[in-house]
Amino acid sequence: MDLSVVVITYNEERNLARCLASVSDLAHEIVVLDSYSVDKTKEIALSFGARFVQHAFDGHIQQKNRAWQLATCKWVLSLDADEAVDEELASNIRAAITAEKGVSGYSMNRLTNYCGTFIHHSGWYPDTKMRLFIKGCGEWGGVNPHDKFELTNNGTSGHLKGDILHYSYYTREDHLKQIEYFSNIASKELFERGKNVSWPLVIGKVIFQYIKNLVLKRGFLDGKAGFTIARLSAYATWRKYAKLKHLHNE
């Protein structure tokens, strides 16, 4: 397969083996771009025959753009270390690359596992992402930490059936840590772009986020996990804007 799988990492010994095992039969090469991990990430990557490169982390978008530029194959599949390709998606990736249909990039759905439960509602599914693309036909954009791959030069896109399995949080504490991490990044990005909000608007956004995840996105169908996700999503919104207000008041 004329396919490079690229993964960015930092201390991903818990997840990386599962990720690379899911694509080991697909990839001509695996490239791991690491941000100087201090755990066993390097050893795991090398055990799968990956090319292991290190660069200081300066943003998800920046790092992912570096990663695909390191690829040597025509096609690039970009994954996060806490993701894995299911069998249906792997089969469809193989078929798409073999068929050569004139498509520049393919999107696919992402199914998230939250504390042992796969979440099919709550605004978390299908969570469609473009992850398979011809090298040079686009680049990562968006606003950190919410990156997205965008095709350039009027490239055509398609969609593949099957799921990227996303093992996001093993515990509620993992989720809280991620909220702090992402809210730091998001608030700084908003501040640097000159954005600000009033406290009444912040409260309105928090309330709407809870209702959206639980009711509008049918999070209640995900049971206890759905209620937890709705509550913590609202909390994440609060932390992001509270930190933004703090930056403006410094």
Image (tube, helix red, strand yellow):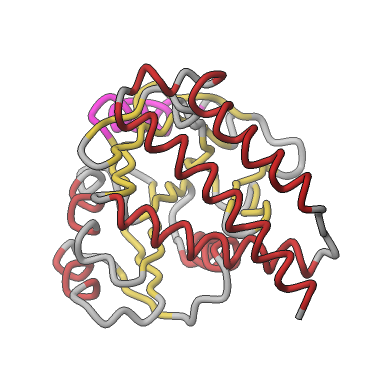
At x 38% / y 73%, what residue is drawn?
Answer: 34
Q: Residue furthest right?
A: 194
At x 78% / y 44%, what residue is drawn?
Answer: 201
From what the image shows, is residue 55 above or below residue 102?
A: below
At x 55% / y 33%, what residue is drawn?
Answer: 210
Q: Quadrant of the N terminus?
A: top left
At x 60% / y 46%, what residue is drawn?
Answer: 149
From what the image shows, is residue 65 above or below residue 123?
A: below
- x then y, percent, for residue 43: 17, 74
Foreground of the two, 209 or 68: 209
Residue range of the region highlighted in magenta in the rendering: 86-100
Q: Residue furthest left?
A: 47
Foreground of the two, 119 or 243: 243
- x then y, percent, for residue 123: 50, 28
Indicate whether residue 194 is drawn in magenta: no
Q: Is residue 217 left or right of residue 143?
A: left
Q: Main secondary structure of the magenta part?
A: helix
- x then y, percent, for residue 112: 35, 36
Q: Is residue 210 left or right of residue 93?
A: right
Foreground of the two, 240 or 47: 240
From what the image shows, is residue 236 above or below residue 229?
A: below
Quadrant position of residue 224: top left
Indicate whether residue 88 is drawn in magenta: yes
Q: Is residue 179 left or right of residue 19?
A: right
From what the image shows, is residue 56 above or below residue 41?
A: below
Q: Quadrant of the C terminus?
A: bottom right
